[in-house]
Amino acid sequence: MKTKTEPAARPSSSPGESPSSGRSEVHICFRNVTVNYASVVALREINLEVYRREILGIIGPANSGKSTLLRCINRTLDFVPGAKVTGQLLIDGQDVLKVRNVYALRRRVGMVFPLPVGLPLSVYENVAYAPRRAGVRQRHELDAIVERCLRQAMLWDEVKDRLDILGTKLSGGQQQRLTLARALSLDPEILCLDEFSIAIDPVTTMRIEDILRELKQRMTIVLVTNLVQQARRLADRTAFFMAGRLIEVGDTENIFEHPQCELTRRYVEGDFG
Amino acid sequence: MAELRYCLAWKRPDGSFQPGETFASFAEAATALSAWQPQSHSGALSTQEPCCTDQVEIWCSCQDEPATVLSRPRYSFVVYGTVAGGGGDGSEAAPWWGLQEAITGLVELERSGQLALRHGQRLRLCHREVFATSAGQKRKARAENIAKTVFMAMALMLVAPVLAILVYLLVKGWPALSLSFFLENPRERMTAGGIWAPLVGTFFLVFISLLLAAPVGILAGVYLNEYARDNWLTRIINLAVVNLAGVPSIVHALFGVGVIMFFAELRRNYGIWVPFEDRCLLAASCTLAVMTLPVIITSTREALASVPMSFREACWNMGATRWQTIRTIVLPNSISGILTGVILQVSRAAGETAPILLTGAVFSVPVPDHGWRAFVPYGLHDRCMALSMHLYTISTQVVNVPEHVEYGTAVVLIGLVLAVNSASIALRVYLRSRKKW
């Protein structure tokens, strides 16, 4: 199986894109997406656009469908028994829900879930796992990928001398950064972060946030967070979800300063309950 | 009514109470408690002052009458030896903190009328260390100990029959055990010689049956745990596995005979190629394989299920296929459990008699004593001897077999089973010590 892993080899833009327009071009588009878990409706008729090379913050209380939204994008919802998705989810105009080769799709979408998972392999092999599966064989290529990803995840300095220890033996915060490094290992064009900072100390979180601002130049980032201030710091635009509905989406500044919706105002001001 | 007197009584090392100073009012008696130097361990008391004790009582009596002491104190209070808190009420659950609080508390209770001693009644104040166990906790601890002992005794009773059987067999079979017992074939209508032929037969049977059952069982277990969704097909397979595991071994044997007859008929009437058409080593091995299959499947599934789901999800998220995930993460981390399950089936297959009784094992097969044929005495389509079958034969079907030969054979059989089981336990312990998460 031969797959493109070099950043340069990836199709950088679709024909209709004008380079100057930058963020205004639609990358991911939800059209009437509804998700059911057996009888429970997790997402209700979501219409949402994510622009290329922006950070979209997604905030909302528990059970509002934030994680489900991410699972739709890389089709890992397929693994949940009884989950049913209707509507259209377009990435670069291609309907994700009809994609045959989900593995290629998942290689384009990096995903970080809230709980740290170190695979029972060495730190090196943890990061090299996906590139190897995707067909990278050359040792020096793998070395370069591993170093780049570990640096981006702010883990390189801590593990560079012991790349051969088990990923499961790292501390919780380190494992979470390892998870982030793995997600970056295929240089995805979309990066989905679900509560990535939950196990990481505040200082490292700040440094990773700086890295995310840098990565934004190359990839679209969807950031689900319970830390409202994190969305405010990082996101270009912010969407507020509640009970499976998209309540409001707009420029982060507007959402926080002049929300259109009363629910949004109360949530971002911490005025709930 | 005569005036009441209050007498301080200190507990003696022998448990009785020694009356001391007498006071005219309760408050005075309570205040005099400040002389108390509480000590928890009454063993060290003998040389000390009477006030160095862990319990003190205030006895109440009329001035005229002699003090008669009732069996139980009317009131009982508890005080902690140290002041590390406050707000206790003197009860068992919330003792007073320190003597001063106790005295204030007692005086306060008496003045408010909540505490009134009459003639012959007494009040007891117990000292307790902050972390000492109370009587209730001691009761609980005792019940806990009794329960543990009973359960452990029951568990130990399991060991007794195993030890008894082993010792009995070893003592009885000891005279027979020697290297030549293993290496010689049975002679003189099985009344002399060793057990080489049945030993090799058992080895062949177990090896071939595992060769058949292990790949099928492991791959089926991987399918059921990693690929199968919860649908009717999976449920049917699960039901089949459970029921196959519950079939008695003699039924397996009869089924084996049925298959032999069916194959023979196919061969005779239609000339179709069949793996076997008569009782033979291969037929017996197949029967054993069918019998061990469900357990191998189940143990494989359990070993696979012990690999956390989050590992698989992490791999799938990176675009790995299911097979890549299984190959790189799931199997390497569950192989120890899978192997343990397979090895345990070795001992089970070696011990079974019924399934091979009707399908391939026979009383006696002439086996050469020398040359390479001694090591490969049976072909796939030959009938064979087996250790369990041999034991059955010499102990019930043949006369004049020396007792120590019978017991020696039993020792070898049970030793084989124990050795294999120990190997599997050792393997599991070793691999668990290298567990990666």
Image (tube, grey):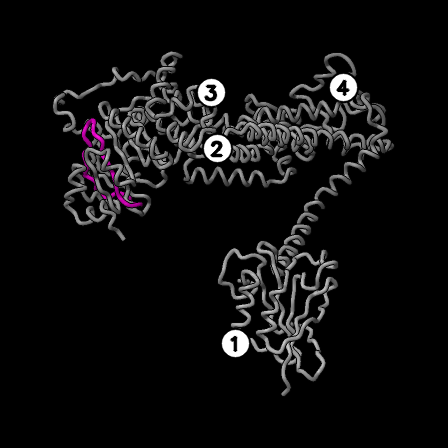
Q: Position of residue B238 (x, y in %)?
A: 49, 39
Start and end of the magenta stretch?
A42-63
Q: Is residue A131 left or right of residue B220?
A: left
Residue A164 numbered tag: 3
* Amino acid at circle 1: Arg
**Disc 2/disc 3 C-alpha distance (Å):** 21 Å
**Mark earlier in primary sequence (4, 2):** 2
In the rendered image, which residue does mark 1 sit on? B111
Three-letter residue code for mark 4:
Val
Upstream in sequence: badge 2 or badge 1:
1
Judge depth for marks 1 and 3 and give the one in front: 1
- Magenta span: predominant SS is strand
Please tell me whether mark 4 sits on a helix, a strand or a loop: loop
Nearest to viewer (mark 4 / mark 2): 2
- The mark nearer the N terminus, 4 or 1, is 1
Find disc 4 in the rendering and name its residue. Answer: B367
Residue marked by disc 2? B307
Please, what is the three-letter code of the amino acid marked with disc 2? Answer: Val
Q: Secondary structure at mark 1?
A: helix
Location of residue B167 by image quarter: top right
Residue B123, percent from left and from top: 62, 72
Q: Which mark is residue B302?
A: none
**Residue A61, magenta (yes or no):** yes
Q: CA distance from mark 4 to mark 1?
A: 104 Å
The amino acid beneath tag 3 is Asp
User: Residues under labels 4 and 3: Cα distance?
Assistant: 56 Å
